[in-house]
Amino acid sequence: SQQGEEDPQALSIQEGENATMNCSYKTSINNLQWYRQNSGRGLVHLILIRSNEREKHSGRLRVTLDTSKKSSSLLITASRAADTASYFCATDVVDSSYKLIFGSGTRLLVRP
Amino acid sequence: DTAVSQTPKYLVTQMGNDKSIKCEQNLGHDTMYWYKQDSKKFLKIMFSYNNKELIINETVPNRFSPKSPDKAHLNLHINSLELGDSAVYFCASSQEQGWVETQYFGPGTRLLVL
């Protein structure tokens, strides 16, 4: 069953604007990760936030985590055309299997 | 200096055939994975190996058989290919198995079964 679901499914913005993507999940987690996938490529890790953290920054990326609502958001500030990609959240499963469950992704288009 | 590599990049084959996809990582990682991404972009774990030992097998049909000759390689063999096997298959690796491990993905193998 799908653990994470991203919202919106697709997002189109102008270069320079901020992009916000949301992820909701169903079960308790130890951490949540965000990955980017450029068209025709593999996924690239962006940022990891642990369950005891509420906010994390990395360059133009800001991730928040609300474990009470089982949700996370990824904010990309001052977007660039090169940010055009699909963005996935991934959560672990709190059992012994150490596996990541990926959401369905948000397709971001940044128009130049 | 590719970190995680897969071959082939594209694979077009007839239904019923047997095919293999190879994966190699030069990161010195202990854990490797196979994922399947369908046409709707859902990415689902299939298998995970840690130091050549199978640790995750996600109810994948027996037609799929992973093999890890050493911890740097994880190959995927698929018997009797079916139309529904058409997808992009990604190999990934991480330093260890664990909840805070970052996974490094290969470029994917696009499989089309006709």
Image (cartoon, coloured by chain):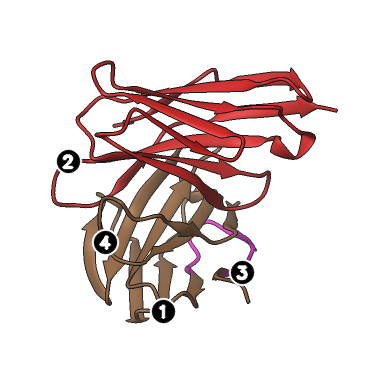
How much space separates mark 3 and mark 4, taking CA atoms? 26 Å
Give left or right: position of A21 versus B60: right
Residue that numbered label 1 is attached to: B72
**Amino acid at the residue labelled 3:** Pro
Residue that numbered label 4 is attached to: B97
Q: Which chain has been coloured red in this picture?
A: A
Residue that numbered label 3 is attached to: B8
Q: Are marks 4 and 2 on the same chain?
A: no
Residue A25 pos. (x, y %) = 31, 25
For image coordinates 40% across by 73% down, the residue present is B74
How much space separates mark 3 and mark 1, taking CA atoms? 17 Å
Is B7 a magenta residue?
Answer: yes
| Helix, strand or loop at mark 1 | loop
Magenta part of the chain: B6-20
Residue that numbered label 2 is attached to: A94
Q: Is residue B72 depicted above or below A32 in this figure?
A: below
Of labels 3 and 4, earlier in sequence is: 3
Tell me the crowding category of disc 1: few under 14, some 14 to 19, or many 20 or more residues within 10 angstroms, Cα based. Answer: many
Front-most of residues B19 and B39? B39
How much space separates mark 1 and mark 4, taking CA atoms? 14 Å
User: Mark 2 belongs to which subunit?
Assistant: A
Q: Are marks 3 and 1 on the same chain?
A: yes
